[in-house]
């Protein structure tokens, strides 16, 4: 138990970034007895506000707990969800997490991925042209994962009918260094186009980019599945605008607040 607690404590939001902060993996624990891990996993509150994402085991021993979903990760997803809900309401898209299936380019096979967020427009607006269950926007958030891991997803996503945008955002372990790519997808684009333009910035408790250009503009007609010559309902904005720096600051602050609360809990009761 002590070893696991120490491993979680290594995820420090205030730690300075490593020399190569771009492609590090979070490995929470290795070679831990399964009985010990089960005791740890049954705790009502996990340290640092983390949630478990993937478990790999062999011969009764936990080998690695991979890429835990943090409060910051979930906060960033929530920020995107709120932005589109405020723009279009709650009845213009399918609720819940989407499982998207498409070609993988190998012998006509299929792949299924569950992106962190997908906007699946419903044909609620006259003129909407939406494939059943199709996504117009896909968002992937990464925590310390190398960019190479998301490339196979991008190749499949780009071949989905009706898809307009793919937004990929990566946060470093300390949530200090951020990078992102926005793919503007059209149905007549090749399946394997050139990479999107890559942007990055850094934030800390005291400093963040000022007068920055890290804004994303999503055309509302395209997100809703409307032809460009269609009439957009008057109550909808022409574009949904995401301030990526504000999103990062909110996610980092949310994670820090949750981490402090959990640390206080463990200091009191463990």
Image (tube, rainbow, N blue to C red):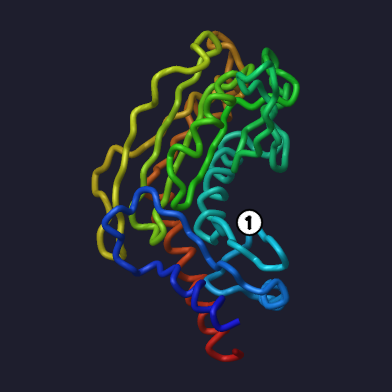
Density class for disc 1 (Cα within 10 Å; few <14, some 14-19, many ≥20) is few
Q: Is residue 220 above or below residue 244?
A: above
Instruction: From the image, tell me which residue sits under label 1.
Output: 53
Q: Residue at x 29, y 37 (%)?
A: 213
Q: Residue at x 53, y 77 (%)?
A: 261
Q: Is residue 14 above or below residue 83?
A: below
Q: Is residue 157 above or below residue 259?
A: above
Q: Residue at x 31, y 42 (%)?
A: 200
Residue 119 rendering spot, x and y as whole percentages = 62, 33
Residue 45 rendering spot, x and y as whole percentages = 64, 75
**Quadrant the N terminus occupies:** bottom right
Q: Callout 1: helix, strand or loop?
A: loop
Determine which quarter of the picture holds residue 100: top right
Q: Nearer the viewer, residue 117 or 103?
A: 103
Q: Residue at x 62, y 35 (%)?
A: 118
Looking at this view, name the residue that lies furthest to the right: 132
The reply, left or right, for residue 21 in relation to residue 161 is: left
Q: Is residue 251 above or below residue 93?
A: below
């Amino acid at each position: 138990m002590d070893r696991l607690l120490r491993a979680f404590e290594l995820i420090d939001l205030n730690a300075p970034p490593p020399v190569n902060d771009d492609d590090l993996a979070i490995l929470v624990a290795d070679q831990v007895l399964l009985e010990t891990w089960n005791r740890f996993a049954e705790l009502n509150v996990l340290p640092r506000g983390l949630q478990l994402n993937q478990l790999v085991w062999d011969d009764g021993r936990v080998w690695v707990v991979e890429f835990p979903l943090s409060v910051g990760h979930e906060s960033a997803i929530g920020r995107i969800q709120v932005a589109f809900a405020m723009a279009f309401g709650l009845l213009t898209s399918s609720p819940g997490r989407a499982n998207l299936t498409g070609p993988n380019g190998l012998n006509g096979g299929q792949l299924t991925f569950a992106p962190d967020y997908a906007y699946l427009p419903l044909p609620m607006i006259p003129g909407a042209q939406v494939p059943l269950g199709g996504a117009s926007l896909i968002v992937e958030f990464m925590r310390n994962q190398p960019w190479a891991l998301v490339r196979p997803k991008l190749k499949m996503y780009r071949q989905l009918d009706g898809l307009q945008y793919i937004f990929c955002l990566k946060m470093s372990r300390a949530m200090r260094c951020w990078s992102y790519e926005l793919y503007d997808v059209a149905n007549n684009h090749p399946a394997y186009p050139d990479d999107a333009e890559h942007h990055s910035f850094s934030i800390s408790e005291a400093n963040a980019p000022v007068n920055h250009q890290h804004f994303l503009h999503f055309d509302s007609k395209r997100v809703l599945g409307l032809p460009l010559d269609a009439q957009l309902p008057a109550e909808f904005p022409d574009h949904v605008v995401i301030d990526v720096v504000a999103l990062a600051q909110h996610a980092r602050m949310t994670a820090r607040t949750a981490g402090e609360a959990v640390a206080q809990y463990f200091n009191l009761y463990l």
